[in-house]
Each structure stands twice: as C-alpha cells, then as structure tokens.
Amino acid sequence: MRGRLVASALLAALLGASGARAAEVETLRQAGPVDKRFNIAVLGDGYRTSDQTQLTADAKAIIAYLFSVTPLQQYAQFFNVKLVHVVSNDNGADNGTYGATRDTALGAYFNCDGIDRLLCVDDGKAAMAAAADVPEYNFAIVLVNDPKYGGSGGPVCASSSNEQSFEVLAHEIGHSLAHLADEYSSEGNQPPCDQQQDCQEANATLRTARDQIKWQDWIEVSTPIPTPPTPENSTFTGLFEGARYTPTGVYRPQLNCKMRDLGADYCSVCTEQFVKSIWTADNIQMIESASPAQPAVASASCDPIELSVTTPPITPSTYRFSWSVDGKPQTETSSAIRLLPAVLMAGDHQVDLAIEDASALVRSDPNAVMKDKFSWSLSVTSSDCPPEVGQSGGARTVSTGAAGAGSAGAAAVGGAGGGVETAGSGGAAAGGTLASAGSPNGAAGSGAALSPSAAPPPRETAGCGCAVPGGSVPPGSAAFPGLVLALTLGLRRRGLKPA
Amino acid sequence: MLRLSGLLLSASVAALPLACSGKTEHGGASPGPAASPIQKPASSPSGAAPTAAAGARHLLMVVELEPAAHVARTLMSRSVELPLPRRRGPTRPAAWRVDVLSGAGALLFSAPVEEASTVRGEFPDASGQLRGVTAQKRVTAVTLRLPWLDGAAEVRLVSADANGERELGRVAYPQVQP
C-alpha cells in the first residue's frame, strides 16, 4: 500500500495556516484525468494509524460494491476514486460499538438527532479534509470504522464499515447523484409533489393516465395501469401505487427497487435516470478531445486526413458514431475516420460526427444528454493527389459519395438513410453565470442533419448543452478548452495546420 | 499559487445555513433544448465590469453555516489549478444559491447550491420494511466552487423557494493573489 500512497507534505504546509491537515492519499480508481472524470473522495474516520491498512481494505470493499451495481458498473470508467487516509486518535464513532465518546478526526457519531442508526459526521471537517487532499473532488463519502449498522446521506454520504451499510450508501447515492425519490411508503419527511407539475423526481408520479406517465416508454401496452402489486408483476415496469412516503396517490415504476428495498437492484426507470445523471455529472463530457481540436482544418498535402474523437469508456461500449461528409453519411462507425484528399477533391468540405450513447438502459432522453456532435470544416487545396492504391482498411477510407468518388481503397457511400435532425448543441454555464458574461458559450458542433443509417430508433430529443456547474466560463472560452492543445502535434505530423 | 484565508466572518448580514455547490448538481429536470443554466443572470453590474481572473483555476471554499444562529464562516479557501467543473445538460434547480457580490453590492456571479442542512437515512424496521428518517443539522458546511473574479468582495448564500428568497449568510470573498 505504501507504494501507492502519495504524500502531501507540501499541501500540509500550505494548509497549515487554515487548520487543515494534509493526509496521505491513495488512488483507488484512476479512470482518467481529474478534469474529465467525476471524482469521488473517500475519507476514513475512526481509523487510527494502526487501522490504515484496514481502511484501505474497507474502502476497496465499498467501492467494489458500488461499482458492481448497474449502471455504475457499466460507467465505472467515468469515475476516479481517491482514498484520504485521515488518521483518528480513537477507532469507531460516538455512540457506536466502542463507546459513547470517541476522539475521531471527522467527528462521526451515531444517534444523530436522536436516531440510533443515523450516522453523521462533522460536515465542515469532512469537507475540509476532502478539499485539502482531493481538491478536485465532486462527491465525498465518509467511511466510519465501526461495525455498527448505520449511515446517512446529505452534504456528504456516510457509511459504517458494516457491510450491510453499503446498501444504505448505494441508496443514498441514488439520491445524491441521480436525484431519485424514495419509493417506500412509510414515514419520511419530504414536501408532497406539486399537483400541477408532478413530482420532480424521475421515479415518482401523481399521474395515472398512461400517456402522462413520465416513464411511459418502459410500460408495455398490455400492462394494466395502475399495476397490481402482485408477484407476477414483479419483473416489469408499470405504475405501482405507493412511493415517496405515501401509500396512496403517488406511484413508482416497479414493484421492487433499491430506492424502496435495500438489497434490490435499481429499477429500470431509476437506472435510466442514473445513466442520464452520470452523463450530466461534473466534468463528464461525451467528447473529451477531438483531433484536430480546431474545427477548421486546412490540408495542403495529399496525406490522408485523420479525424477522431475520444470518449469516456463505457463497458461494454454502447457508443454509436455516425460520420457524414458534406451531408453524405459514411460507413465508418468508429471514433475515427480517414479521408483522402484525392477523394475529397480540392475545395471546402464539412465533416460532421454525431455520437450517441445508445445504451439500452435509456429509452427516453428529452434533453439529449446521451448525444453530442462535432464538426470540422476542411479546406483541401491539393488538386493533383493520386488515389491511394491498395490502401488497407478500406472501411476507414471513405469518400464523399460526390463526383470524383470511387478511387481505389475508397468506400463510396450512398446518401440514403433517414435523417435524424438534432437540435443545436450549445455550451452553457450550468449552475451559475457571470453577470457580465453572455452565455451560452458557442460549442464547436452545430446543428446538422445527419443520416446514421445504422442508428437505432432515435430517442426523443430536444437539445444538448455543455455546461459549467458552479459557475459560468468567461466569455469567449472554448467549449472544449482541453482540446485545443491536443491537436497541434497531430496536425503538424500530418502536414496539416489549423485554418 | 495556493490561496489561503483564515476565518472570514460575515461583517454585517445575518448568515444562515447553506449547502454544497459544485458537487452533485445534475441536469435532467427542466425541459427545453439548450441548457439554460443561468439561475439568475445578474443585471449588468454597474461600475467596473468583473472579469474572470483566470480561466484555468478556480476558488474552492468550505463555508460552515449555523442556521439557527445565523452564522457563516469560511473554514477554508484555496485555489484549485483546474477550470470550474463543466457539466452537460440543463441545470437542475437547487434550494439554495450562492452569489458573488462586488464591493458595491453588484451581483457578479450566481450559482445553485444544494440544500445541505438535511441529513437522510433509510433503515429497515423489524419487519424489513424500509423507513426513512431525516434530521436537520444545527451546523453544516457547504463546498463552493467559484470563479476568481476581479472586484469580488462578498459571497452570499441564499435560500430560494416558493415563498421567496431568504439570505442565509455571507462571508468575505478571498482576495485574489497574483
């Protein structure tokens, strides 16, 4: 473990003035750069110096559990996880297994607000510990070294080291990350749903007319509405009465769900919402980088022009890549395409890429968060390029399907295919705005009619925007600021230059 | 590069509790195509127009709030060498909001903040039936991610609901170091 620990001595010195102490940080999951992943900080409390190895084991266990749950399993590569080795003087938590008063770094205590199993921490200390040692963190989990069953959700999620508490944590993450409603009918403390606007959460509704149910895409025509809570109806989606602390008048999608029963899976509707929440989580971008990064590219040589994007990995991949050149759909279905100047011919060309996460876990995407796009404007100046004879990988060498196509190695693609019109994508500042800044920011991709011939039935879409939570970006900022650097090298290597 | 500030107590206004921002704010709720994240586009501030001091870094603050006592204080502030987290999709409304104000009181920046004083728990009862519990914490803390802004003087936390807005408290905006 030692070898994987990163000492933060400098940080400790710098933070000393504000009272925060740096701790050792262990990377449990490094899926990608911190500015392109959702970053979880796991903090230990009630772990003494001698318990730090146990902290690692406990943290790995809880993270392994969380990422075994659908859909976190499929989207695990969207998350980084770091463990902060906060050292306490005592083990356990107040009112826990080891006594009523324990001296722990983050002040964990059971019997929070008089509720025996409710496990709370000092939010300020937890936030400072995370901010000091994992400043990129987007979400914090405090793991408390006490075998007593308990946990909580709120500004930070807390779980005891009791394995059954992991289920509480998974449930709480359903609230925190996916903004799901509780589906149980028993007591709770939540304002009732608005009769006019319906419940805010994706998994609760007041509506009983089939065409008004927000998860209607998941309900088979033959399913009765409302759906009787019988065992034979336990495996599919319907409209089950009882949710959000109310036994009547509020409905949930399935008979069982993790938001109702600890130990159950997330139901289809909650899973769908979770996936969409992952796609709108801090730092997550569908197009992480593009090559070339700049949308305007000039080619003065006869070298093939290679265009590509990178996306965060989904396991297994459910991406669909649809390319078009000058409005003509291409056969290429990967994240990269290779264009021959000889085929393109001299002149200006438009290359559009539409990306979709076509996961079967999502059936309705009204905000188009499962889609994105990127466009390049190519200026080809060479007019005497010979066709590449014997070019390998014909599928990656495409033509425009326009006049002059048909060079050796080029796969001309006909232009048939129903166009899927997508709304324009615009960058925007989620969560905040600069008073003087006009938003949204312009995004690279603009609306274009694409024709993904092999695309699945289009989801209901409206539009998609890139956003900046917590504050808007300054005016004029690039929608994909990280992309600009990446491509100069590739351009130069290929004899290309940004136009 | 790292910025630190000691405890910055609100000078005048009553402070109240607040929640975390820049952490787990998600889209999906509001319909409509283009994300329109702006909670409350401030009217053009009078006087010197604020500008982001640096796009590749941002201010991270941990602010402690004591709702009943109307006290807010900065526990920690530092600069993070990363741009503000970006997010796709529409902005999800939140119960609280953070505003950055100039010395003249002009609104320079605004962002939603999740309510942070409520703690939830769900535990099965003796029959295995899940039961929910909630507690209101007397003292809570919010994590704020804010842009570095020239001319910023205060950070104000506001609760906004159907009954209107209520200021929860304010702390000093840390001074930007070169």
Image (cartoon, coloured by chain):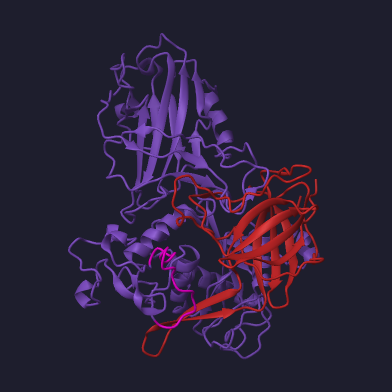
Chain colours: A purple, B red
Q: Residue furthest top?
A: A384
The answer to whether residue A52 shows anywhere in this view is yes
Q: Is any atom of residue A73 visible in this view?
A: no
At 53% from the left edge and 56% from the top edge, which residue is drawn? Answer: A38
Pick the residue in front: A489 or B36.
B36
| B58 or A318: nearer the viewer | B58
Q: Position of residue B25 (x, y in %)?
A: 54, 59
Q: Is residue A313 magenta?
A: no
Quadrant where the image shows the C terminus of chain A: top right
> Within the image, what quadrant is residue A96 found in?
bottom right
In the displayed structure, does residue A63 sit left or right of residue B50?
left
Write down the quadrant of residue B29 in the picture: bottom left
Instruction: Give the image location of residue A60, x and y in percent.
Output: 50, 68
Q: How many marks?
A: 0
The reply to whether the magenta stretch includes residue A190 is: yes
Residue at the (31%, 18%) spot, across then down: A402
Figure quadrant of the N terminus of chain A: bottom right
Q: Which residues are magenta?
A: A186-203
Q: Position of residue A65 (x, y in %)?
A: 43, 69
Compared with A61, B94 (above or below) is above
Please give left or right for residue A495 compared with residue B108 in the image: left
Q: Position of residue A317 (x, y in %)?
A: 36, 48
Q: Is residue A152 left or right of residue A254?
A: right
Dominant secondary-structure state across the stretch colored magenta: loop
Picture layout, residue A457 above or below residue A262: above
A229 lies above or below B105: below
